[in-house]
Image (cartoon, rainbow, N blue to C red):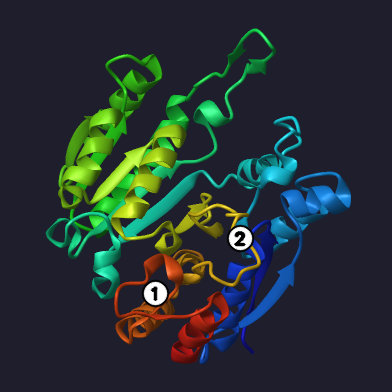
Amino acid sequence: MKPTKKILILPGDGVGPEVCEEAVKVLKSLSNLNFNLELDFDLIGGASIDKYKSPLTSEVIKKANSSDSIILGAVGGKKWDDLSPSEKPEKGLLDLRSKLNFFANLRPAISFKEIIHSSSLKEEKIKDLDLLIVRELTSGIYFGEPREKNNKFAFNTMIYKSSEIERIVEVAFKSAMERSKKLCSVDKANVLEVSQLWREVVDKKSILYPEVDVEHMLVDNAAMQLVRDPKQFDVIVSSNLFGDILSDISAMLTGSIGMLPSASLNENLKGLYEPVHGSAPDIAGQGIVNPIATILSVGMLMKYSFGEPLISEKIHSAVKKVLSEGFATKDIAQKNSIIVSTSEMGDKIANYVS
């Protein structure tokens, strides 16, 4: 009898429900699995605020804890902008990451030759690009205390324990060992004490991985280098704030933020999988959002949490096949593209994974 894998789907706000719908299509189209899939759905972010007055309920936390992994769409929107930080939709996502200890955020940036001209960079700069950003996700300035805002001043605290740095750096070194054995650690050690500790921990950990070529780079230079010569990088590891910024820069290298998946893992490889893009309320409900990032996030789920790299590759190949046939959503459309809707793109990819 096949085991059952439970996936919790949290569509969220804006375009989140649209992209999650296409991810579900792909999940339901997968054949010859070694397990049965059980899907459950619930609310997070603004949708949860509207119904329950909370961006993340205790019931959803219970469901998340009992699931094998989670797929999330997006949270946030102008509708909730006037709420206090502790009540905003984004607080639900931050709490979910924190309560389930999803500390390791993996954000690959891979260029598809089929849409290479969608990028603002020259083809020779991004051809065969394949880099991975490993971002610390549950500490740093987004979670640091104390923090305060009034009408005269505001402040936040960037804080890292050496143990928190060590565990994310360990993930980065292991990732580098599986790839090209090349790691770039990004910090701001010239002015920030927290970055000086970060650099010290990286150097100490590097002794255990003598095969990995380690480079330190200041975050401002790293941002410039990503758009100047992105293929110099293979694995980048950075703090929560810096990783957030650099991964969005890497999104545009591939042509659209709608192409970038992500995985957030805890120490047991249970994961929260979501597209890098936000809720994009300005295009919500129009059927034009690109679902590929969310679909590729399903591929990452299969690889990292379910230990099924062949299924992950099957999903990746299905995306390439559809793109090679000239189909594209509006954000990645080129001169001769056949522009399709969100749903049509999901249908086509699901057809090739079945």
- Amino acid type at circle 1 is Pro
Q: Which image quarter: residue 261?
A: bottom left
Residue 287 drawn above or below residue 180:
below
* The residue positioned farthest toward the front in the image shown: 335
| Rendered residue at 74%/33% (across/down) | 82
* The residue positioned farthest toward the top in the image shown: 152
Q: Earlier in the sequence, mark 2 or mark 1?
A: 2
Nearer to the camera, 114 or 294: 114
Do residues under tags 2 and 1 come within 8 Å of each other at their CB atoms? no
Residue 340 drawn above or below residue 82:
below
Report how far apart the C-alphas of labels 2 and 1 lie in the structure: 23 Å
Q: Mark 2 points at which residue?
A: 73
Assign a secondary structure to mark 2. Answer: strand
Q: Name the residue under label 1.
A: 309
Percent position (x, y) of residue 98?
62, 41
Percent position (x, y) of residue 351?
49, 91
- Amino acid type at circle 2 is Gly
* The residue positioned farthest toward the right in the image shown: 52
Percent position (x, y) of residue 281?
63, 54
Number of other residues with Cα within 10 Å of mark 2, as a class: few under 14, some 14 to 19, many 20 or more: many
Assign a secondary structure to mark 1. Answer: helix
Residue 171 visible in the current orientation: no
Percent position (x, y) of residue 308?
44, 75
Taking the image as shown, residue 312 lies to the left or right of residue 320, namely right
